């Protein structure tokens, strides 16, 4: 029970990596708030957690909407007490070269990935200040470190989230709140499956995703969730302002010319 006594909100937790983090947090003893646009799926995750003996609350909300964010944090506090862990995982990913991205898509990407994270932080921090303790973890991505084609708006928000973690850590370190970010490489997730399913010839592409990571494969959801458990727990009590890459070596890989 590495997260006993933790009251954690996880955004975008109805599916994919967020769901995986929620299940692991509950298994480690945290009470978990499942925030997502997909209300029905939030409840399914809560049912899964409860049937495994954990405790959780479904909180359907759009994190880009200030009033919904405030309501979400209030409901969580009424149910479980002060929120002392926040995982900012929800994101959208408009794809394509920048000049073909619509202003509406660009704005929504900023509104969810960056401003939504800001709104969630703004809503939980007063409670964390009351108790003098908290851990906030932003979901960044290797695309916030590396240039990968077709992801300009998304990559800008992911780089922004690491910057936000660094700056926020200096604001709150002395008040007991730690702020970190995690930057995964490609993860075997519904997002990847959807992307591959939309391709004409997915198998060679899947192999390329595996091969581009020096470890020789894409990551698993649980391998990302493990790092979130560490950063949410008191085991990481001296860690703040960091961005942890969980990318099988992708972001540090160099290339040598081949014969
Ligand atoms: N899958 C990968 O390979 C990968 C790699 C690096 C980083 N990431 C990051 O990990 C996180 C999760 O990725 P995933 O693959 O599980 O994505 P996903 O698309 O499967 O899940 C994202 C969830 O966020 C929810 N969401 C979107 N907008 C929302 C909003 N405004 N309010 C509330 N909920 C909202 C969606 O409904 C969805 O359930 C994202 O931040 C993503 O950028 C993913």
Image (spheres, helix red, strand yellow):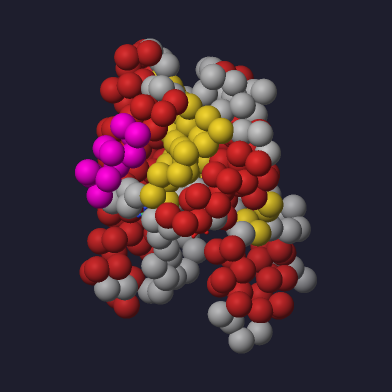
Quadrant into which the C terminus falls: bottom right
Residue 11, percent from left and from top: 43, 45
- x and y percentages locating residue 129 in the rendered image: 32, 17
> In the picture shown, does residue 158 fall above or below 164?
below
Q: How many marks?
A: 0
Which residues are the magenta region?
A: 65-75
For the point 42% across and 63% down, which residue is it?
A: 93
In this view, 200 is above or below 122: below
Looking at the image, can residue 231 be seen?
no
Left/right placement of residue 201 relative to residue 215 reads: left
Q: Nearer the viewer, residue 152 or 123?
A: 123
Q: Is residue 68 visible?
A: yes
The picture quadrant where one finds residue 216 is: bottom right
Is 200 in front, or is 61?
61
Residue at 30 percent of width and 55 percent of height: 110
- Report if residue 69 lies within the magenta region: yes
Q: Quadrant of the N terminus?
A: top right
Q: Where's residue 195, x and y in %? A: 56, 72
* Type of secondary structure dominating the magenta stretch: helix
Question: Whole-percent x and y of residue 107?
Answer: 25, 61
Identified at 39% across, 32% down, the residue is: 76
**Frontmost residue, 54 versus 26:** 54
Relative to 200, residue 45 above or below: above
Q: Nearer the viewer, residue 168 or 59?
A: 59
**Quarter of image, res 59:** top left
Residue visible at 66% across and 79% down in the picture: 202
């Amino acid at each position: 029970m590495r997260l006993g006594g933790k009251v954690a909100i996880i955004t975008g937790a109805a599916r994919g990596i967020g769901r995986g983090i929620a299940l692991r947090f509950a298994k480690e003893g945290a009470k978990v708030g499942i925030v997502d646009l997909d209300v029905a799926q939030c409840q399914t995750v809560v049912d899964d957690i409860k049937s495994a003996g954990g405790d959780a609350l479904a909180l359907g909300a759009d994190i880009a909407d200030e009033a919904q964010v405030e309501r979400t944090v209030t409901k969580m506090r009424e149910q479980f007490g002060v929120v002392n862990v926040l995982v900012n995982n929800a994101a959208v990913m408009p794809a394509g070269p920048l000049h073909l991205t619509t202003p509406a898509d660009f704005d929504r990407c900023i509104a969810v990935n960056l401003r939504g994270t800001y709104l969630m932080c703004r809503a939980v921090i007063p409670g964390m200040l009351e108790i003098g303790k908290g851990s906030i973890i932003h979901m960044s991505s290797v695309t916030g470190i590396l240039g990968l084609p077709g992801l300009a708006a998304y990559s800008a928000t992911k780089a922004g989230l690491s910057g936000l973690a660094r700056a926020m850590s200096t604001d709150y370190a002395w008040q007991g709140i730690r702020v970190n970010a995690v930057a995964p490489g490609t993860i075997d997730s519904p997002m990847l499956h959807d992307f591959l399913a939309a391709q004409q010839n997915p198998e060679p592409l899947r192999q390329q995703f595996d091969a581009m990571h020096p470890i020789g494969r894409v990551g698993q959801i649980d391998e990302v969730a493990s790092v979130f458990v560490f950063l949410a727990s008191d085991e990481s009590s001296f860690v703040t302002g960091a961005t942890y890459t969980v990318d099988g070596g992708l972001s540090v890989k160099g290339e040598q010319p081949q014969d």
